[in-house]
Amino acid sequence: MARTTYHYRDPLAPRPTMQTLGALALIEHEGRLLLERRRDTGQWGPIGGKVEINESLEQALRKEVLEETGLTVASFELFGTFSDPSRIGAYSNGAVVRFVVLAYTVQIDDFSPLQCSDESMELGFFTRAQLANLDLVPTGGDVVRAYLTRQPLVLD
């Protein structure tokens, strides 16, 4: 069975046939960043997903956080826009997608409902030192690196 692969600045990446908009949540708790270990790749990445055609960015962000973690967004702020055309996902069904992602810093008031979704193998909180050695999904790794350096990336 073919697995999902994600590519960032990879000259061997397949050519995308469609584009999608995504919303990512950067959630910190006690100085550690929350990530999910994705079931489709086994790699770690930020919480988030596709913005459906019938929802706003805010609705998508709140939905993805709730679905993937059980947590409720208290507040959020735009961190950065990630639109490098080399941000590509190749899915087992043959779809090859270019991702344009808006990443948000997200505040959570209550972490007690935290739970893993079916899309994830596990959830974890990571320190800056731990993140440096973590196997990050390429299309989330650039967002995490920008967040760690507090340098939001805004590309045209």
Image (tube, rainbow, N blue to C red):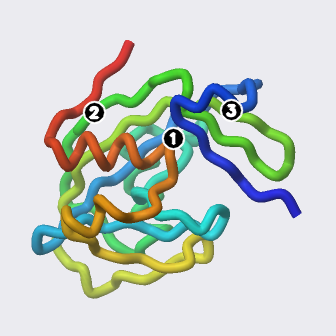
Tell me: 93 left or right of 146: right
* First in sequence: mark 2 vs mark 3: 3
* First in sequence: mark 3 vs mark 1: 3
Q: Which residue is mark 2?
A: 80
Q: Quadrant of the C terminus?
A: top left
Q: Which residue is mark 3?
A: 13
The label on residue 66 is none
- Image mark count: 3
Instruction: Name the residue type under label 1.
Output: Glu
- Disc 3 crowd rating (10 Å Cα; few below 14, some 14-19, many 20+) is some
Instruction: Name the residue type under label 2.
Output: Gly
At mark 2, the secondary structure is strand
At mark 1, the secondary structure is loop
Q: Which residue is mark 1?
A: 55
Nearer to us: label 1 or label 2: 2
Residue 50 in picture, x, y percent from top left: 55, 45
